[in-house]
Image (tube, grey):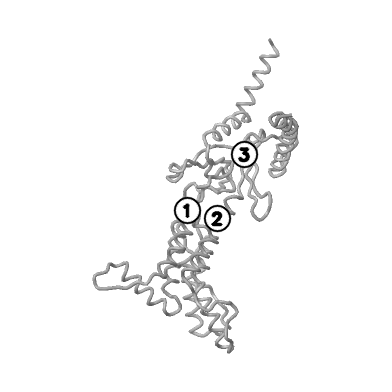
Amino acid sequence: MSDEELSTETAEEESPQVETEAPENSTSSQNSIREKFRLTGDEEILKDVKPSIFAFVPMYLISLIILGAHLLFAIDWDASSDDNFMVKTMVFLIELSDIGEIGFVLVMLGVAWFNRMLNGTTSGKWTTIFLLVVALTPPVLRLDDFIAWIMNKDSGFIPLDEFSYTLFGIFWAVLFTLFTIFYQRSFHYAITNHRVIFTQHLIIPGDGRRILFDNINEIRTQRTMLGAMFGYNTIICDTGSQLGIGEDAMSVSVGTSGGGNSGESVTTEGQVAKSIFKKMFAILTYQRTRKIDLPDPRFSFFCITNWKSIEQLLNEMHQRHSQSGILNDLKDQIAESQD
C-alpha cells in the first residue's frame, strides 16, 4: 500500500474525532458563559462584549508619568547660566532631594493633586491612593533607617538601604500597568432576550447589574476624542437611577476645625501640627465638582468596539419590550386571528 493511501486512511480515521470534539467544546464554552452571567432557564445571550484594549489608555499614561518622574531624578542634571527654566528647576529639586528625596516627593504629590483636579477617568480614589503611596515611599524608607539608627541596628525592617529612582520607577510603573490590565479584563457585558447584564469578576465573582429592557428610559452614546481615534464608544442605558451620571467630588470637611472638650489640655505645638496636617490632606484630596456624564465601567457598555451593532440591538430590544412594541404585537395577533 502506498504512502498516499495510508495518509488518506489516517485522515479518514481522525476526521470523526474532530467532528465529535467541536460540539463538546462549544457546549462547554456556552455553559461557562451561562454560568458566568447567571442566566435563567429560557434566557439566551444575543451578544456579549468586553471593553476595548484601548479603553483605559489614560491609566496607562499614568504609568508612563510615574516612570518618567522617577527617571527625571535619575538623570545627572548640570545647570549653567544659559540653561532654560526647566533645567534649573530640576537641578533645584534634585538638590532638595539630597535631604530625604524631598524634591521627588513634591513632584509626585503635585502629580497626584493635578490628576485629582482633572476629575476624569483617572481621578478615582484608588489611583490617588496609589500615587500617594509612590510619593511617600522615600520618606517611609528614610523613617525605617531612622528607627534602625535609634534601635542601634545595622538595617531596618525594610531590606532596602537606598532609594533607586530607576528601579522604583520601573517597579511602580509595571505594578500600576498590571493592576490596570487586571481591572480592564474584569468587565464583561451581555445582551440577552430579556435584559442587559453588566458583570465585573474582580474580587467578588459575578458582581454587577442586571437591567430589564422595560426599565430602560433612554439609550445614549458618549464618544470621546480617544474613542474617535481608537474606534470605540460608550453606550449608557439610563434607568433614571443616576448611576454614572452627575457629580464626582470629595468633601473637604477634614480641613475644618471641630470643637473640642474644654477640659482637654492640648499644647500649642500639637494644635499647629494637627492643623497643618489637616490642611495638607484637604488640599491633596480636594476635587472640583462638575456635572457631566461620568460613565462607570460597571454599569455601562464602557469603551466597546463594534458599538453600532450593539446600539442597534439595544434599540430593537428596547422597542420590542416597550409598551408601544407590546401593543403592536397584540395588534398583529388580533389581526391574524380575525383573518
Q: Residue furthest left?
A: 82
152 to 50, vertically: above or below: below
CA separation in Å, label 2 and label 1: 10 Å
Residue 115: percent from the left, percent from the top?
A: 45, 59
Which residue does the numbered mark 3 point to in the structure image?
48
CA separation in Å, label 3 and label 2: 21 Å
Which residue does the numbered mark 2 point to in the structure image?
180
Which of the 4 quarters of the picture holds residue 16?
top right
Depth check: 286 or 68 in front?
68
Secondary structure category for the residue under label 1: helix
Q: Earlier in the sequence, mark 3 or mark 2?
A: 3
Q: Earlier in the sequence, mark 3 or mark 1?
A: 3
Image quadrant for the N terminus? top right
Near mark 3 (Cα within 10 A), the count class, few <14, some 14-19 or many ≥20, is some
Task: Look at label 2 and name its amino acid.
Answer: Thr
Which residue does the numbered mark 1 point to in the structure image?
58
- Kindly identify the residue that appears in the image at 44 percent across and 61 percent down: 65
175 to 18, vertically: above or below: below
Residue 77, label in figure: none
Q: Is residue 29 left or right of residue 120?
A: right
